[in-house]
Image (tube, rainbow, N blue to C red):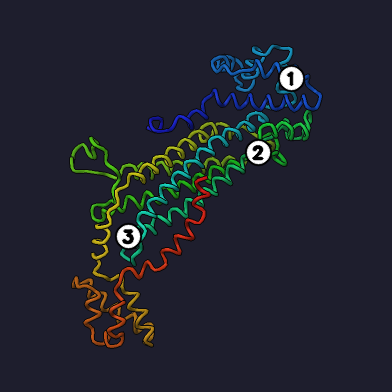
Amino acid sequence: MIDRYTRQEMGRIWTLENRYQAWLDVEVAVCRAWSDMGRIPAAAVENIQAKASIDVDRILAIEEVTRHDVIAFLTSLEEKVGAEDARYIHLGCTSSDIVDTANALLLMQAGRLILKDIRALLTAIESLARRHKGVLCMGRTHGIHAEPTSFGLKMAGFYAEFERHLARVEAGIESVRVGKISGAVGTYAFLSPELEQRALSYLELEVDPHSTQIIQRDRYAHFFTSLAVLAGGVERLCVELRHLQRTEVLEVEEGFAKGQKGSSAMPHKKNPISAENMSGLSRLLRTNALASLENQALWHERDISHSSVERVIMPDSTILADYVLTRLTKLLEGLVVKPERMRENMERSYGLYFSQRVLTALIATGLPRQQAYEAVQRLAMQSWESRTPFPDLVRNDADMSGRLGAAALAELFDPSYYLQHEDEIFARVFKNAAANKA
């Protein structure tokens, strides 16, 4: 299913051809650094750059014999470049110098696509928020009617959250934007910090201040947990959309294409399948983050227990994130919003959402809080049990109406009161909207 929907751009990053190309980019950068320092002839570097290329089938064939992917890769390069100059490739390096530094390049490529996806999602959320600014709907706590909000404010809240997800993923990418060319246990025994700095500058990577044989996996954990927290945000939005699509609520609907079917048994069904799918896939993203956390504790200067895990979670998590974000954006762009139904649902609790307004108005007259609370609660319970509009009970209660007065009663039951600060909230939430789109 994922392959059907995932954009080719993200899938291409994790092909063997692109992975080996990243290895080659690192090897060439090291050769150039050696040449800058006078260790390798410039002509040899030119020959390596001209002749070295990726032949996936040949590398895999050699690996069948060597049982070592990096050695198979290097052997393939030697066949293309020639033994004379190929001897300079991988000079002084260990496999992880190449693999971990290349991982940074691959994760940066994938991370940039994910940032692009988040920005597209932010644009879709902002559009929904602005189009439904002032559209009253019921706010719910514990699943129960609380006080009115607007659908625009509901979406603005999600915008603010995904803006934070954007910043977290940016920080996660920056955490893995480091390389290491420091040798077998990080001591530069056959290399040097100068060489490392020169090589990584060609790749636009930062130097890991202290690596062992590997880049430490707290950096990777940072990246993958940023995707996990992002997935939590995706699921929170999808759960909200799923609830709002329930038959009893029906304030929004996912787009339903011509010819689409909802159930093999019940022709009337229109199900929230996209939101449900994304809720499930978000769980996979969080699970993969746990695996990245487990990868932090390796033996001594390194072991290989992390490698098999990363061969799965690096492509899977980034492809999943790309897919989920793209699909969620598409869902929001086609979302059918039902303001009339929102207004109908508000009245299903008989105006009980005005209870706090009445409570605070009574307190303002000098009535002690607990006494005011009990008086309002008595009428609220009567409203619910008798299905009588709460505002009518307040107006008809002699003690309450006498204390509040006709002028106050005329203003108390205006739902627009709850949106009096909507403009200020929007201004705060969307102050960086233009920058996020850049």
Residue 178, labelled with which disc? 2
Position of 278 relative to 59 (above/below): below
Q: Name the image quarter holding the N terminus.
A: top left
Q: Position of residue 169 (x, y in %)?
A: 54, 45
Q: Amino acid at mark 1?
A: Tyr
Q: Amino acid at mark 2?
A: Val
**Label 2 CA crowd tier, 10 Å (few <14, some 14–19, many 20+):** many
Q: Position of residue 24 (x, y in %)?
A: 63, 24
Q: Tell me how far mark 2 sits from mark 1, CA to CA.
A: 24 Å
* Element type where label 1 sits in the image: loop
Q: Amino acid at mark 3?
A: Val
Position of 92 relative to 139 (above/below): above
Given the current orientation, which residue lies at the most extreme right position? Answer: 38
C-beta proximity under 8 Å, tags 3 and 1: no
Task: Tell me the residue at 61%/21% (across/down).
Answer: 68
* Element type where label 2 sits in the image: strand
3 or 2: mark nearer the eye: 3
Query: Toward which corner of the image does residue 219 lie, by quadrant?
Result: top right
Residue to which mark 1 is pinned: 88
Question: 126 or 364, which lies in front?
Answer: 126
Lower position in the chain sequence, tag 3 or tag 2: 3
Residue to which mark 3 is pinned: 135
Q: Position of residue 362 (x, y in %)?
A: 34, 83
